[in-house]
Amino acid sequence: MIAKSLVDNPDKVQVSQLEGEQTTILELKVAPEDLGKVIGKQGRTARAIRVILGAAGMKLKRRFNLEIIEKT
């Protein structure tokens, strides 16, 4: 996934998927020291990932929501 290439600890990246009727929530869990890298300056990186998910969702006729969570 894209997030693994952005972080210093790719082995600590976890993605879980919660399925709804028309929406899928993707929970992206990263190490605390990698949180800033995934979010980016002013949220630009996170926004770019969400745009890609939105484009994929249009093709699949699903809506994807991305939640970025600090792994404890």
Image (cartoon, rainbow, N blue to C red):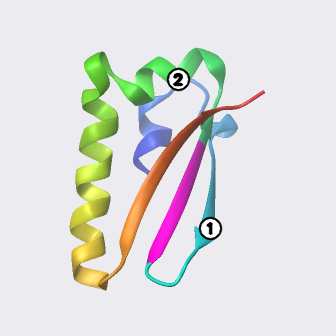
- Residue positioned 43% across, 38% down in the render: 5
Residue 37 x/y as whole percent: 42, 22
- Please state the extent of the stretch shown in magenta in the rendering: 23-28
- Residue positioned 28% across, 16% down in the render: 41
Quote the CA–CA distance across marks 2 and 1: 21 Å
Task: Residue under label 1, please give it.
Answer: 18
Type of amino acid at the residue the image marks with label 2: Leu
Front label number (2 vs 1): 1
| Residue 35: numbered disc | 2
Asked if residue 21 lies left or right of residue 13, the reply is left
Type of amino acid at the residue the image marks with label 1: Leu
Q: Quadrant of the C terminus?
A: top right
Crowd tier of the residue under label 1, counting other residues whose Cα lies within 10 Å: few below 14, some 14–19, many 20 or above:
few
**Image height of 11 relative to 56, above or below:** above
Q: Main secondary structure of the magenta part?
A: strand
- Residue positioned 26% across, 62% down in the render: 54
Residue 56 x/y as whole percent: 28, 70
Tell which circle, 2 or 1, labels the residue nearer the N-terminal end.
1
Residue 25 x/y as whole percent: 52, 62
Asked if residue 49 lies left or right of residue 3, the reply is left
Residue 25 in magenta stretch: yes
The number of numbered discs placed on residues in the rendered structure image is 2
